[in-house]
Amino acid sequence: MVLAFLSAIGLLASVEAHHTAQGATQAADLLFILVCAAIGLWALRRYIFLLMRAEETANQANCPDCGEYGRFRVVCERARQHQLDVRCSKCAREWVINTPS
Ligand SMILES: [Zn+2]
């Protein structure tokens, strides 16, 4: 998200410089505008991807029996299968949380 914010600042500065520049400098500013826009879009896309992965994992944190959210202990971690066996702290129900690879 920081990279997207910095690229937005670079993009705005480039647009401002593009309006006041002439000749070859204006072409360089235009190139810089395109580079900043591309970096900003990539950073925003990456941020949304990571946010969706976190949300996907968080959605599995509800106990299937009592509905308690996020109160569990990890019983076993199977890193190769990207899974966690967890036990509810309230009712002791066990379930599996799939972690993103
Ligand atoms: Zn429970």
Image (cartoon, rainbow, N blue to C red):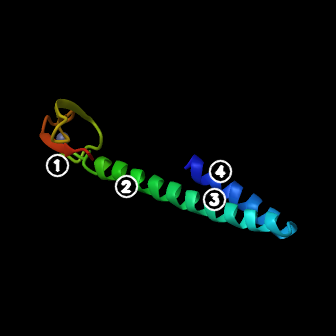
Label whose residue precedes the other's in the sequence (4 or 1): 4
Q: What is the CA distance from the residue labelled 2 to the residue labelled 1?
A: 21 Å
Label whose residue precedes the other's in the sequence (4 or 2): 4
User: Residue placed at 70% from the left, 55% from the top?
Assistant: 10
Q: What residue type is disc 2 on?
A: Met
Q: Which residue is mark 4?
A: 6
Q: Left or right: 23 with respect to 50?
A: right
Q: Residue furthest front?
A: 24
Q: What is the CA distance from the residue labelled 4 to the residue labelled 2?
A: 22 Å
Label whose residue precedes the other's in the sequence (2 or 1): 2
Res. 68 image quadrant: top left
Is the residue marked 1 within 8 Å of ligand 1, measured from its CB?
yes
Q: What is the CA distance from the residue labelled 3 to the residue labelled 4?
A: 9 Å
Tag nearer the camera, 1 or 3 = 3
User: Residue placed at 41% from the left, 52% from the top?
Assistant: 51
Q: Which residue is mark 1?
A: 64
At numbered mark 4, what does the secondary structure look like: helix, strand or loop?
A: helix
User: Residue placed at 66% from the left, 58% from the top?
Assistant: 8
Label whose residue precedes the other's in the sequence (1 or 3): 3
| Crowding near the residue tagged with mark 3, few <14, some 14–19, many ≥20 C-alpha atoms within 10 Å | many
At numbered mark 3, what does the secondary structure look like: helix, strand or loop?
A: helix
| Crowding near the residue tagged with mark 1, few <14, some 14–19, many ≥20 C-alpha atoms within 10 Å | few
Task: Kindly check if marks 2 and 3 are in contact, taking CB atoms under 8 A apart as contact.
Answer: no
Residue 78: x %, y % from top left: 15, 35
Instruction: Give 96 or 68, whichever is nearer the viewer.
Output: 96
Tag nearer the camera, 2 or 1 = 2
Q: What is the CA distance from the residue labelled 2 to the residue labelled 3?
A: 24 Å
